[in-house]
Amino acid sequence: MTELYDVIIVGAGPGGAMAAKVAGENGLKTALIERKTDLSAIHRICTMIINVDEENFGEYITYNYRNKRFVFPHNGFSVKYDGPIRKIYGFHIITPCGNRFRIGDVKEKAREQPPVGLMINKGYWIQIMVDEARANGVEIFTNTNVNNVRKESDCVVLTDNRGNEYRGTFVIAADGVNSRIARKLGFNKERIFLGTYKDYARTYEGAKIPESDVLMFCMGWNTSISLSPEITEGHFHVSAASYSVNADLDGEINRFLSSEPYVTWFKNAKEVGHRSSCVSNIASPIPVPFKDNVLLVGDAGWMQETSITGAILPGWSAAHAVTEALIKKQPNKEGVTTYLQWWDKYLYQPYGKRLASSGSADFKDYLSPEDIDYLGSLVPEPQPATMNFFMIMKTIGRAFANVLPRIQEERPDIMQKLMAMRSFPRELALTKRRREGCAIVS
Amino acid sequence: MVEIDKEKCSGCCGCVDHCPVAAINVINDEVIIDNDICMECLICTKVCPLGAPHEVAQAQ
């Protein structure tokens, strides 16, 4: 009979590392299982940005430069981070000809306006948290792939790729957007499949990109193209992403880089480092992230991009809830009520419900690159800076609602396309996503 | 059978996650496919953004 852990955490990303650190500090007998050996190596595409000094999932994260700690004042904790930092001032949408819709201004007032995002070395931060977890007695199993989960009467049993078993009173699943644990527990059967999102990036050095201390989302291409600064000064990554598994991501990056003005921006740039990628099985957020004594945190119970903030916070909350359940001798759903309430209040009610009903027509099926250039010329003044995904959506909606009468007058043809796009039946959009994607349910 | 081109693989683990029978694992930081478990559904070849997993003729 193998030993029984109070809690086993699967996945040493930001959510799992945070949960392990908290469980260790609370004195629980804890194991953290990760399939990589080098926890600081990040192979999946990630912008590695922490949203700061604005609301995110009920928290207002700030960075204490003096003590080198990220501070979470609403929840009342802080985490050490003494690695490199790069300030990010917002989110820009760039249309094919180079028109910008700016959320956050770096051109005029970069020095006056505080950053809304801090880019960090995520791998280094994870390593800090895991080291603190280890110092607090957490057992770390690396090079270990968790491939199965089952519930027994008094514990949860995990099986790894070598057939070893791990027993825990609770399990915290922090195994990401394609969570095998969520799938094995049957969560996916109750979720709406919203598509397979495939993403691929190259890193360049020596590119000359104007207003570059922002995330740049380029619209009007056959795939979504993003430009993002990296933590290494002078490095940028260019990524192409699509909901179609058959999309030519490589070819689309080439096409982008050979068009003006981008060809000029990248004239003296050369590709460096290893190409990175990411593929996400996107299903609607899970309303109650608990089953059979397994708690889901971060993307494991979400769909895509709760971002680092959305991983750290549930990791923290879930580990405390498990601690409380064990103290109260309630090793069950009632025991971890605080976590389920937290998830409902800060993730599911405000955002999850809305995301669950997402899925709409693709811009590129309705609007030509020239149409998008026109729309991109309508709002030249920068909008208030934010890196909060939901605020970005709200800002776009608000800004364009104001110019609808002008579009109607100047370009009734584009107005008609926008209206047609809006009334495209959701069920057809989802059918298209299913056909072009690759759902993993069982 | 399916092979993974190490030169193309970024290590993002999309195929590891999508494999319905857990035939693909990360071992010593390398994505490795176990062809004894693989049932050749080819989901890995569809989801990989870099085209690393590919079908090859059965080794004799």
Image (tube, rainbow, N blue to C red):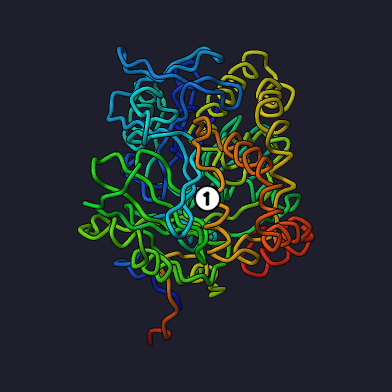
Q: Amino acid at mark 1?
A: Ser
Q: How many discs mark residues in the rendered view?
A: 1
Compared across the picture, whether A41 is left or right of A365 comes to left
- Name above or below for residue A407 compared with residue A11: below
Instruction: Check the residue under mark 1 and report the chain it is in.
Output: A
Residue occupying the point 53% across, 47% down: A159
The residue where tag 1 is placed is A377
User: A86 or A155: nearer the eye?
Assistant: A86
- Name above or below for residue A307 compared with residue A243: above
Residue occupying the point 66% across, 29% down: A343
Residue A259 image-quadrant placement:
bottom left
Q: Residues within 10 Å of mark 1 (few under 14, many from 20)?
A: some
Q: Quick check: can you spot residue A318?
A: yes
User: A97 or A234: nearer the eye?
Assistant: A97
Compared across the picture, whether B10 is left or right of A314 comes to left
Residue occupying the point 57% across, 19% down: A320
Q: Quick check: can you spot residue A442?
A: no
- Name above or below for residue A137 compared with residue A308: above
Residue occupying the point 32% across, 16% down: A65
Q: Which quadrant: the C terminus of chain A?
A: bottom right
Image coordinates for residue A257, horizontal then vertical, percent: 34, 64
Image coordinates for residue A227, horizontal then vertical, percent: 39, 50
Image coordinates for residue A109, horizontal then vertical, percent: 37, 28
Compared across the picture, whether A192 is left or right of A315 comes to right
Residue A211 image-quadrant placement:
top left
Query: At numbered mark 1, what does the secondary structure look like: helix, strand or loop?
Result: loop
User: A371 or B18: nearer the eye?
Assistant: A371
Image coordinates for residue A148, horizontal then vertical, percent: 57, 50
User: A157 or A241: nearer the eye?
Assistant: A241
- Name above or below for residue A416 compared with residue A179: below
